[in-house]
Amino acid sequence: MKLILEGANEREITLLTRYFVKNSIEVIKNNKEFTSISITKDQDIFPDKLKVFLNSVTFKIGNIPKHLRQGPRTWYYQKAIRFNDAYFESDDKSVVIEILLNPLLFDITMTNELISRIKNVISHEIQHAYQMHFKKEMYESDDYDPEKVNDSFESFKDYWLLPTEVEANAKGIYKKAKHLRIPFTEALDRFIDLYIKDYTDVNYFGNEYKDLLIDLFDYHLRSAILEYAIKNFPASQVSESLTIIKKIIEEELKKV
């Protein structure tokens, strides 16, 4: 049952995104305080197709408090849009997404970018809900503590290379490639470049980890996603040249 792979839930994800943005417009336009909006499956607005494996989606959005715009973690908030948290809670089958806007950098003209990023994150977390329901053994085999993902570079790296994360990211990239009508490898390049820039720009884990972060995304994660794509996506969508690219990456990994 491939509900996510071919973008079959695109309409449902778009519906949820528009609902959340519409109901948080005061925060977006007028720098209002934090707001939380939840949709549960007993509400008419909740997409029927998602009720099979999901009970609720909660969207939280707010502006970064003034006291957080200065201080030791100022670097963390120096983006117009910051996904402060996003996760799937398997116990109650709920997705929670929390976004912080920097009112010094964000303006209403960036709403389309906000919508696009919300859609991507909702799609990713719903993929985890799908995994838990239809691929329970695989989902439960990923043993990690979400509270400790950012405690060290090692736990951060382990998280990104979890099979469930690799699959969810690969499917998101695949869907993006089909939507933009670009090769999978080009969509993958954009994905990798975005995260390299995101984490190296803010000096995540300190300057001594910059090269290791680049290696994580540009070699380890790229290789894992390519391997998944070659095994699971149609050859017509994923070029056979990926096999050659993967071999090159594997050779580079041996040098790391």
Image: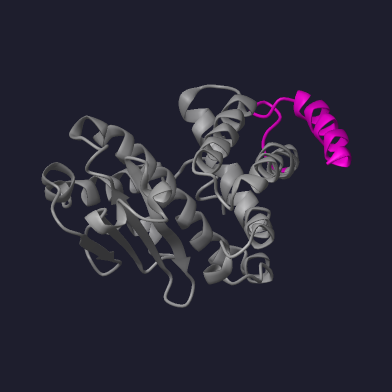
Q: Which x, y percent locates residue 136?
A: 62, 69
Quadrant position of residue 199: top right
Quadrant the N terminus occupies: bottom right
**Residue drawn at x 60%, y 23% as measured from the top left:** 183
**Residue drawn at x 73%, y 44% as measured from the top left:** 220
**Residue drawn at x 69%, y 40% as measured from the top left:** 211
Of residues 87 and 78, the one drawn nearer to the viewer in this rendering: 78
Q: Which x, y percent locates residue 35?
A: 19, 60
In the image, residue 15 sits, relative to residue 50, either above or below, namely above
Please tell me whether the stretch drawn in magenta is mainly helix, strand or loop.
helix
- State left or right for residue 190 relative to residue 138: left
Applied colour scheme: one colour
Question: Magenta span has 24?
Answer: no
Task: Count numbered badges in the picture.
Answer: 0
Q: Which x, y percent locates residue 128?
A: 52, 59
Of residues 238 and 24, the one drawn nearer to the viewer in this rendering: 24
Quadrant the C terminus occupies: top right
Question: Magenta span has 243?
Answer: yes
Quadrant position of residue 67: bottom left
Of residues 32 and 140, the one drawn nearer to the viewer in this rendering: 32
Quadrant position of residue 33: bottom left
Q: Which residues are magenta?
A: 232-256
**Residue drawn at x 67%, y 65% as measured from the top left:** 138
User: Extreme bottom residue here?
Assistant: 91
Q: Which x, y percent locates residue 13?
A: 36, 47
- State left or right for residue 139 relative to residue 243: left
- State left or right for residue 48 relative to residue 120: left
In the image, residue 126 sits, relative to residue 11, either above or below, namely below
Of residues 196 and 137, the one drawn nearer to the viewer in this rendering: 196
